[in-house]
Image: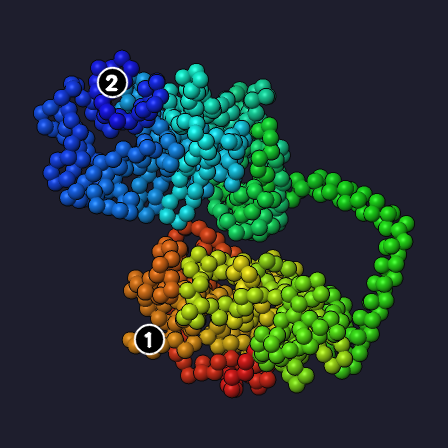
């Protein structure tokens, strides 16, 4: 670090450059906007402990804007090129100020290009005015946090070049920048900050520079030639110019002219397009008709559109992503967020698709919304391909003796299955008309007995009104949970029928998987996948276990339950209302992924049915919505209410029923509502989360939870809206007073069983607690 004069200029600046490189290469300038006119200036410490550049007359030319003060300031130039100011007695590496937070035109290894959402600090590159003048020039290069992050090169307020979003491996629009042995780079996005950075993987010297003429360049020092070698640049060609071909336009340098429309799109103004004015871009040749059905077509080999008007979720599957986009008429396209390992996450585009470039490689597939009529040709082609494959497969199967033997074995198995079902129907277990719905593998009783060590007490996981649950291990090592119906439980019998018929047709990562059943002799059992971490209530309501669930795990669980309910309400073959969503019915696998379980009292609907009325209220008080507990009316909004209770319980670590507070007699919902109205929602959180929670995320979760438990069902959001609200930063509506705001005498029992008396109107018959 020292004083230097750039190019042919006689002005002096305080700067940092490489020590062991023969060509002086300045990477940072302190007083870039205020040059020194002579050599009388000094870098010193002035009272009260301020690091400053002072000219010959004693005027402060430049001084860092330090976040704290100290009586013992020390300035140190690190080997990384970072100039830092810290307390002389600091042993923990805390900086009062560092030059890495204020880049000029050069990004060095370890520097961050992006924004800190907590402090508001934004770091970007700004070019020199010229090779003789380091003052900020016309060009900037930044990591834009709007929507899903991507890097932008701009001149003033005009965007010139976009890298495309980060896809887990690189930038969508820079396929030539591949993993290498010289450096590694990535975009990091957390709740606290988003930034682009790189680190060197070898002893090579490399820097990333924004030149004074507006080109982003990576340089590598070559010892043998004692020169800087240009490794990469951006933009690279005509089609890298931002939105060159307008909305829905596609730029390809191999064509003449370079601009064209995406397949199934046409120019918005044919005359302007023919005259070389592509600014208005293209439109779909068949207009969308969201309410009567749209679909998606996959486009491969393109730089994906500008993501500033996008929404994303890291945990969704591509199928879930498609369904969310399909249900929102403003959603124009979707893609995987991360292309590694087959793809994961969800990225949605809203409004027009801007700045698309055709690449010579396929980096990231994008699925663009189209009218259903545009999908006919594609579907015909798929049907032909599938039909051909089936014919070939059937031909091979027909001439195979092995398949013949297997078919005969399957037929025998089916006869046994029907015999068992007919036998059970005589005893009242499964009636004959339901056997077609029992689309599950049948386990032999001896297999289940062997797997559970003959239903040993040591294998017992728990017991409810239906009977006991045992852990088992099949011969191949697969662990299972066996739900054994009690011979004396009519409640369990009804639940068994309902659960077999209902859950057998449901498949989702956030629903517990039913592997099969066993119906033999007097035994009736359900076989599930085994959940090693048992149920959610074992964690959040236990003082020692709750410490194992930090906020990131709890938020992951909240989102998983939300996606499971969304599947039940909208995406499954039949709309399913669970009716008994609670912490003990949320099971956790080995990775703490939530699985909704216990569909014994669930109800399914077809067509456009959304609600029903029952004269037998079954469920668990504390989670039941007012309209269901009092009037027997249940709908998807009943489950939304239960979900809201669950969210508040997960955040607080307290049960809704049984909650007590020295200052009032409200339940957990009432307590959360009071804190919300007083602007003190953070007081609700579990003590176990004090060291791990993200303030913005937890406040949003509490807000969403309160929206879900509003008294009027019409005021509660749908689960599709809940999933979007949890994953975005958009403003939320004001929550209204929750249902069951105060403790009520009508809610004194812990749970209702199917043995309860029939009720009509607004009457409720209370019974003793009967565990499920």
Q: Label 1 neighbourhood size at 10 Å, few (<14), some (14-19), many (20+)?
A: few
Q: Secondary structure at mark 1?
A: loop
x and y percentages locating residue 188 in the rendered image: 43, 42
Q: Residues within 10 Å of mark 2 (few under 14, many from 20)?
A: some
Quadrant placement of the N terminus: top left
The quarter of the image holding the C terminus is: bottom right
Q: Could you say which is closer to the camera, residue 770 or residue 755?
A: 770
Of residue 640 and residue 165, the one placed in the foreground of this image is: 165
In the rendered view, would you say 43 is above or below 703? above
- Tell me the residue that label 2 is attached to: 5
Check the image and report above or below for 11 versus 733: above
Which is more N-terminal, label 2 or label 1?
2
Q: How is the image coloured?
A: rainbow
Q: Residue furthest left?
A: 57
Q: CA distance from mark 1 to mark 2?
A: 70 Å
- Furthest toward the top, the residue is 8
Q: Which residue is labeled 1 in the image?
A: 661
In the image, taking residue 55 as reference, residue 698 lies left or right, namely: right
Horizontal side of residue 463 vs 548, given as left or right: right
Where's residue 505, x and y in %?
67, 63
- Name the residue: 51% across, 76% down: 620
């Amino acid at each position: 670090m020292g004083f230097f004069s750039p190019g042919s200029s006689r002005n002096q600046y305080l700067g940092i450059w490489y020590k062991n490189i023969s060509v002086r290469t300045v990477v940072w300038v302190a007083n870039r906007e205020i040059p020194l006119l002579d050599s009388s200036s000094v870098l010193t410490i002035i009272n009260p402990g301020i690091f400053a550049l002072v000219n010959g007359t004693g005027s402060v030319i430049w001084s860092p804007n330090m976040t704290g003060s100290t009586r013992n300031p020390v300035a140190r130039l690190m080997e990384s090129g970072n100039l830092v100011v810290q307390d002389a007695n600091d042993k923990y590496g805390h900086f009062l100020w560092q030059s890495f937070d204020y880049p000029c035109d050069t990004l060095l290894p370890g520097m961050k290009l992006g924004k800190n959402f907590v402090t508001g600090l934004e770091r970007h590159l700004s070019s020199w005015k010229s090779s003789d003048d380091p003052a900020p020039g016309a060009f900037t290069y930044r990591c834009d946090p709007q929507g899903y992050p991507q890097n932008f090169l701009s001149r003033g307020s005009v965007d010139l070049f976009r890298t495309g979003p980060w896809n887990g491996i690189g930038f969508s629009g820079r396929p030539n920048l591949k993993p290498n042995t010289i450096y590694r780079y990535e975009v990091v996005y957390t709740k606290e900050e988003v930034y682009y950075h790189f680190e060197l993987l070898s002893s090579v010297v490399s820097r990333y520079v924004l030149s004074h003429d507006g080109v982003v360049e990576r340089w590598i020092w070559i010892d043998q030639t004692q020169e800087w070698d240009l490794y990469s640049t951006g933009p690279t060609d005509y089609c890298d110019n931002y939105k060159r071909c307008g909305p829905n336009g596609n730029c390809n340098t191999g064509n003449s002219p370079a601009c064209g429309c995406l397949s199934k799109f046409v120019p918005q103004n044919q005359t302007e397009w023919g005259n070389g004015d592509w600014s208005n871009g293209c439109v779909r040749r068949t207009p969308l008709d969201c309410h009567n059905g749209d679909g998606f077509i996959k486009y491969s080999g393109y730089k994906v559109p500008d993501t500033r008007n996008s929404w994303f979720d890291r945990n969704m599957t591509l199928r879930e992503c498609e369904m969310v986009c399909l249900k929102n008429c403003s959603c124009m396209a979707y893609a995987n967020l991360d292309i590694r390992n087959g793809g994961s996450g969800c990225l949605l585009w809203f409004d027009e698709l801007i700045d698309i470039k055709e690449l010579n490689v396929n980096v990231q597939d994008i699925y663009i919304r189209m009218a259903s009529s545009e999908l006919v040709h594609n579907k015909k082609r798929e049907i032909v391909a599938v039909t051909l494959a089936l014919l070939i497969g059937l031909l091979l199967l027909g001439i195979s003796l092995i398949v013949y033997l297997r078919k005969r074995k399957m037929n025998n198995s089916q006869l046994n299955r029907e015999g068992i079902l007919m036998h059970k129907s005589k005893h009242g277990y499964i009636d004959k008309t339901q056997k077609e719905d029992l689309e599950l593998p049948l386990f032999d009783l001896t297999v289940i007995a062997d797997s559970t060590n003959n239903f040993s007490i040591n294998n017992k996981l728990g017991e409810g009104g239906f009977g006991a649950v045992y852990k088992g291990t099949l011969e191949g090592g697969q662990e299972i949970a066996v739900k054994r119906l009690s011979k004396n439980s009519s409640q369990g019998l009804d639940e068994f029928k309902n659960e077999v018929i209902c859950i057998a047709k449901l498949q989702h990562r956030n629903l517990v998987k039913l592997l099969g059943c066993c119906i033999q002799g007097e035994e009736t059992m359900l076989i599930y996948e085994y959940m090693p971490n048992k149920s959610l209530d074992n964690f959040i309501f236990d003082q020692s276990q709750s410490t194992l669930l930090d906020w990131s795990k709890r938020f992951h669980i909240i989102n998983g339950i939300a996606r499971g309910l969304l599947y039940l309400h909208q995406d499954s073959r039949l709309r399913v209302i669970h009716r008994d969503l609670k912490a003990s019915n949320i099971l956790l696998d080995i990775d703490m992924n939530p699985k909704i379980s216990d569909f014994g009292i669930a109800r399914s609907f077809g067509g456009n049915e959304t609600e029903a009325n029952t004269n037998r209220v079954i469920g668990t008080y504390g989670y039941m919505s007012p309209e269901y507990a009092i009037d027997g009316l249940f709908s998807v909004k009943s489950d939304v209410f239960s979900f809201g209770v669950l969210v508040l319980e997960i955040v607080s670590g307290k049960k809704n029923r049984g909650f007590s507070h020295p200052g009032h007699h409200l339940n957990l919902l009432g307590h959360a509502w009071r804190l919300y109205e007083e602007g003190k929602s953070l007081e609700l959180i579990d003590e176990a989360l004090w060291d791990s929670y993200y303030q913005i995320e937890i406040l949003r979760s509490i807000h969403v939870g309160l929206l879900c438990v509003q008294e009027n069902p019409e005021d509660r959001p749908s689960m599709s809206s809940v999933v979007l609200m949890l994953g975005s930063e958009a403003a939320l509506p004001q929550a209204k007073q929750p249902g069951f705001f105060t403790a009520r005498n009508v809610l004194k029992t812990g749970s209702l069983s199917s043995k309860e008396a029939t009720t009509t109107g607004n009457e409720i018959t209370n019974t003793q607690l009967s565990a499920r």
